Image (cartoon, rainbow, N blue to C red):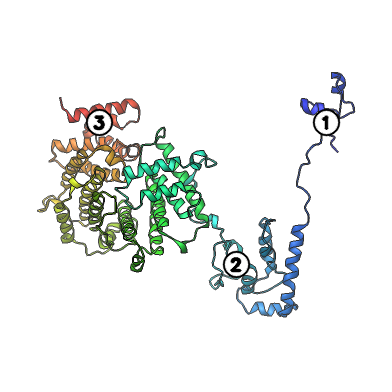
Amino acid sequence: MVRPPCDQCNRRKVRCDCDNPCRRCRESDITCTYTLVRKKRGPKAGKGKIIESLRSRASAFTPSLVADGGGSPEHRRSISQSHALSEPVSQYVPQLQSEPYNVNQTDDSAQMPMPTSYFTFDEFTSHILADDLNQYGMPNSPIDLSGFPAGTPIMPALTPVHTSVYSMPPTALQTPAGRGDDLESTAPISRAIELFFLHLYPIYPLVDRETLENNLANFDTIPYANKTLLWSLCALTLAHVDSWPSLGTEQRAVGARKFIRLCFDIRLDWTIEKACFADVLTSLFIGLTFFELKFRTTSNFYVREAITLSNAAGLTSPQTYTTLSEEDGIKYKRAYALLYITERGAAMHNNFPVTILAPPDLPTAVLPSEDPSISIGLAALHSLFSLLDFKFVRIWNDPTAFSDTGYVDLSSLQSHLSKMEFQTSELSDIQKADILITHQYFRLIFWQAALRQGFISTNAANAAFSYNFPADIAIALCAVVKSVPPVAIQVHGIGIFEKQFEVAYSLMDTLALSSSTRPEHHECLRYLLLSLSASPNSRQIFVRTLEKAIDGQQKYRNLAGVQLLRDDSKSRQASRRQSISFHHPG
């Protein structure tokens, strides 16, 4: 037995020979005592609650087996053989016992019977799993085991709720431990609401500011759905708007992931059966945030989840709108239209499949205290995306598949786009940037679809089917970019820069392959590079890609100005000087 050191040696943290008095105390001429009461290490002695609970389970279950004639092993085996999936229960007992026992369990769970012998899987399900299905988020109904081979363990198939789809990959949701004081306070949410209605409401006119502020003022008492809506709105604003003091791009991305994690934590106890409009908006905002954080597949997952929730919440049911106020009905229809627009955009960017086959109806009414330009801009964007019908999306996602989208259809689409006119004087700069850039991007999309079908030629009578058409699109896009402030473009996030990138890359291909280029084409390429360099995310993704392509074509190296592609402060200053000299030559 190891003897403890004396109090003085323990306090001095020196080795003690454990005599009384010890050597060090004698040498130091101090009193040697052993009065310190030391804590006992190791597990504390139990009170036998677990053993008593196990005994009560066994005693409660044994009489039922005897009453059913289960006292005879031969009889039980004959019953077991009548079911193709019957197996001895003993092989599942170690799996049940391998889980740590919860000493704080309720009285109901303590009375759950424990099997002691052989019986069928149906009996196992009815006796053992009936009370456990609820805590694992499963319906309390008989389980169909006809598709499983004999001897299949049941317990591993039960997945606790905390491993649901809301447990995202660490790469997408890795955050520092703890929420931090910045998330516990409502100040970030208040700032997010202010920035949302300043920059993002023209894009997503789905919420009422007064309602959000009232929910924030009563944050501790509002339903969970309203809390997750506030957090997801804050995450969306952090990811999109660069107007947070002392927060850089990376800090805002970390903050957005933290608020998304809060939404996931709340949704652990959430049921789809009671989905509401706030749940739809939460999933939509989470999907949009993940898109800005460069998680395309994750973003599409939550956009499609929002579409599924919109069905559960009744956004697609005409009966729902009979019980809603006029304002709520407008918001519901706007939300479903924006889900259609968002899903179609993902299909164009990443070839994702679509679930909303036809364009939904969009009301033109204006909400109280809302600028009329909001409804006008949303209607213009809706009319653009309505051109992307299911027939076109199918051939776009799979060019090898049979499609009746032919030359006449694509020519009609291009003609329709060229004749579309927008009331730009009644639109805000944010709406104008979104609509006009998307308009030029769709011209390129339809041209690329024609290229895949083999309709593009050098001697085409229709300019929309010629190889030089991307150059005309780029010139029109440059005029649009020059007509709006840079912040009106940047607030849309990485999606609008990707549209500019597609046009710039197609222009660069045209310049490389065509011998009849004009000086304004080269100037247009240079200006698009300057525009793409305005956003850190765009500079990191799209400008780097264009830089590599330009490096492979020495013909355009000096023309494009490789200096502006660097991230240091000197290169940014050079970029600004080049931009000034571009607008004011000489």
Left or right of 475, for residue 102: right
Mark 3: amino acid:
Gly
When asked about the image quadrant of residue 409, the answer is bottom left
Between discs 1 and 3, the one toward the N terminus: 1
Mark 1: amino acid:
Pro
Q: How far apart, in angstroms, are the residues tagged by discs 1 and 2?
A: 57 Å
Question: Residue 464, which numbered label?
Answer: none
Which one is in front, 187 or 313?
A: 187
Which one is in front, 71 or 482?
A: 482
Pointer 2 residue: 152
Mark 2: amino acid:
Thr
Q: Secondary structure at mark 2?
A: loop
Farthest residue in the right direction? Answer: 20
Q: Label 1: how many residues lie within 10 Å, few (<14), some (14-19) or many (20+)?
A: many
Which one is in front, 238 or 193?
A: 193
Farthest residue in the left direction? Answer: 461
Position of residue 348 measured from the top left corner of the image (x, y, whole percent): 29, 53
Q: Label 3: how many residues lie within 10 Å, few (<14), some (14-19) or many (20+)?
A: some
Compared to residue 173, the image places residue 405 above or below, namely below
Q: Secondary structure at mark 3?
A: loop
Pointer 1 residue: 5
Pointer 3 residue: 561
